[in-house]
Image (cartoon, helix red, strand yellow):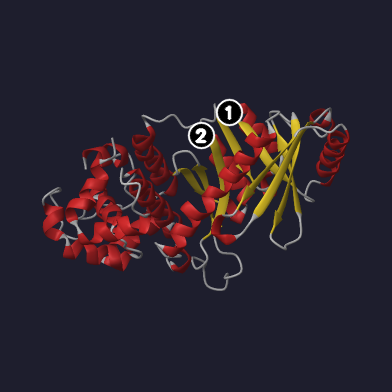
Amino acid sequence: MERFMDCFAEVEDPRKHEGEHDLTEMLFIALLATLAGAKYCTDIALFGREKEQLLRAIMPLEGGIPSHDTFSRLFRMLDPKSFERAFRRFTKAFAETVRITGVVALDGKALRRAYESGKSHMPPVMVTAWSAKTRLALANVLAPGNNEAAGALELIELLQLKGCVVTADALHCRRDTAQAIVERDGDYVLAVKDNQPGLLADAKAAITQAERKQAKETTTTDADHGRKEIRTAIVAPAGDMASKHAFPGLLAVAKIRSKRGRDKTVERFFLLTRMYKPAALLDIVRQHWTIENPLHWTLDVVLDEDQARSRKDCAPENLAVLRRLALNIARAHPDKKTSTRAKLQRAAWSDKFLLNMLTNVR
């Protein structure tokens, strides 16, 4: 509780008269409830009522247990930037003994049912920076105007990237994104597709030239989930592409050729800031996709994020940050054999385990 209060004390209370319920207490109850599997504000209020004896043992609760309407109003009014800053401060408690290095994946995820009436075709998009090494969400922003690329730029400005390799799909293969990464001392591996035709054509030409010279290739074979997939990677110098296309930091290009079962062979091209060995490139690209199952899949299957209907004002963004914070805490727990879903279930059943997950934040 003390560490939580230290990190969240600076969150601005949006209520004019600060209300009868303490802001930090409300946020702490919401976090505990989410760790116990709560998905909506009604769940959070129900958790508070059922666990009132436990909660009174660790906080004063002078105003009693807030209602679900009170929680809903709070998350609608709460400044997302202030809440996100507290999220980052709290997350540092998990990683303070582990320097963030290696792959940092950027990707957006639609909050599919958090749309305003009549706007089901454009749900808000939450962009997350994900550490593949620590399996933690490092920072999150709501894409301004559903512009995921602009959201990614905001994220990069929040991060220290020395020793990190930023990975992203072709949507983020942009000069301003590359510039922002390089300025923060990071490297990048960015997918390039037809959205950058000039870059893609020159990348293909460089790879073709390297293949003619019989440059080193590396091939791996995976048979996970009953599907055999063969991947072959080759890396080539980018030549004058950086100056020709005014693309900051561009030093090399790469191609990965994938063949899965009877499916057609797929070729993907990448822009790099380093001449990675083909084996290292394959590993980096594979690590990028850890953002899908450990984060996005878990948010949807375990915490029902795709079904969350909080859609007014700042509630979608704030509750999305709260869910990611809960997953960070669950993953930081030393029991690595138990799934995240099982940890949340156990937290719902056992007060001791619920509090134990928080005490593992050092």
Q: Quadrant of residue 199?
A: top right
Residue 304, image x and y in percent?
A: 42, 65
Reading the image, the residue beneath label 1 is 184
Question: Does the residue at mark 1 contact the one at mark 2 (Cβ under 8 Å)?
Answer: yes
Question: What residue lies at 79% left-to-right and 46% top-to-bottom?
Answer: 196
- Which amino acid is tagged 1? Arg
Quadrant where the N terminus is found in the figure? top left
Q: Residue at x 44, y 29 (%)?
A: 99
Instruction: Please name whichever residue, 110 or 236, is drawn nearer the observer in this view of the structure.
Output: 236
| Disc 2: which residue | 159
Looking at the image, which is closer to me, 31 or 143?
A: 31
The x and y percentages for residue 338 are: 33, 53
Q: Earlier in the sequence, mark 1 or mark 2?
A: 2
> Separation of disc 1 and disc 2 at Cα?
8 Å
Secondary element under disc 2, as helix, strand or loop, is loop
The foreground one among 29 and 346 is: 346
> 10 Å neighbourhood of mark 1: few (<14), some, or many (≥20)?
some
Label 2 neighbour load within 10 Å: few <14, some 14-19, many 20+? some
